[in-house]
Image: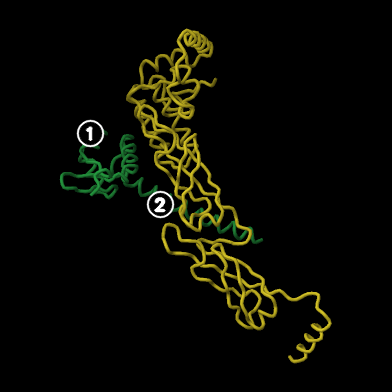
Amino acid sequence: MEIPDYYKILAIGKEASPEEIKKAYRKLARKFHPDLNPNDKDAHKKFQEINEANEVLSDPEKRNKYDKYGKDWQHAEQFEQQRKSQQRARTSGAQPFSEGNSQDFSSFFESMFGSGYSQQTKFRGQDITAELKLNLSDIMKTHKQTFTINGKNIRITIPAGAENGQTIKLNGYGGQGVNGGPSGDLYISFSIPIHPVYKRSGNDLFITTPVNLYTALLGGEKIIDTLEGKVKLNVAPETQNGTTVRLKGKGVPVYKKEGEHGDLYVTYEIKLPTNLTEKEKELFTELSKLK
Amino acid sequence: MQTDTMIPVHEFCIHHKLEQSFIFALKESGLIEVTMTQENYCIPVDQLPQLEKIIRLYELDINLEGIETITHLLDRISQQEQRIVELSNQLNRYQSDE
């Protein structure tokens, strides 16, 4: 069991007055508060340490206990043994806080002071982060999805046009607060892997499609699959290899702008015929002589 | 007007042990919205997460000007993070083409 040095955490001396403790706590809390450091796990951990240090040092009784036993392993062990024997003597009772909340305090804090925190100090619950895997086709339409986190079923709306790596915040769906403190927030980040066929850039999609030589030369129709069904394209006569056409509004929906879509860019890859028959060779030779 | 989506300012202030002038100062600075109903001033429920966050900052001895600056900078950070995500996705696209 690691004994945290609460004085070091708050960067104060052993003789610090209650006013100095309060000042040091506020100064550090302003630096590491989760509201000021969203998505920063290190800052969140540091803030928990600062909270714990303040919880102990700002309470004369707890500070006295910490000063007496905290720095001395021998006494701490004795205290631990005494505490265990006291615990055995006690009737078994339910833990007042769930596992998630107890993680907010070090094991030392809990063994020394128990997990019942002082009534006057409120702690915000932990922020929880989760990743939701989506396919490109999943973000073509706004839809609802239910998933389980921390044993709770949460139904969220996946907005059309969401980006890979984009994070949405659900206020109050994180860990439960302590002593009436507010619940933490739930951060869900979308993971959308690169599609094997469609490349995405913002709201635009890019696709390469093969076109045979005769359609490219003489023009014709070409049917392609899009994420929202088949689309018929008119290939212009004498289309060059690498020609790109734009299908307006066939891209990804614009995030939170209903009815607006990006575009789909189709690049033609002209395929030359192979395994020519004698007749075909003859005709191509004849054609070549015309030029 | 749906009253279940509105919280009277005076009730909110009693609950959070705040002066009503604090809420109106936040309204003046544009940090939150306060609506006037027939009887009294109310806070729309959707403003609560933002307001509670502001109160947490206020409890850390950050004054109104500081909260205003922090809120503005956090918005900027959020926009920059979104831009990083977009650029990172574009980079992935080009790398996958190689």
Q: What element carries label 2?
A: helix
Looking at the image, which residue sits at the far right?
A: A278
Q: In the image, B14: left or right of A75?
A: left
The residue positioned 77% from the left and 85% from the top of the image is A284
Q: Nearer the viewer, residue A228 or A193?
A: A228
Task: Please state the horizontal and vertical placement of residue A255, each as a whole percent of the image.
Answer: 45, 58
Q: Quadrant of residue A11?
A: top left
Q: Which chain carries label 2?
A: B
Location of mark 1 (residue): B14
- Which residue type carries mark 2? Arg
Q: Mark 1 lies on which chain?
A: B
Task: Please state the horizontal and vertical placement of residue A230, each as a whole percent of the image.
Answer: 57, 67
Chain green in the figure, letter: B
Q: In the image, A161: left or right of A21?
A: right
Location of mark 2 (residue): B76
For the N terminus of chain A, give its image quadrant.
top right
Q: In the image, A122: left or right of A207?
A: left
Q: Nearer the viewer, residue B22 or A288?
A: A288
Q: Is mark 1 on a helix, strand or loop?
A: helix
Q: Nearer the viewer, residue A12 or A130?
A: A130
A283 relative to A233, above or below:
below
* Label 2 packing within 10 angstroms: few (<14), some (14-19), many (20+): few
Q: Quadrant of residue A199?
A: bottom right
Chain yellow in the figure, letter: A
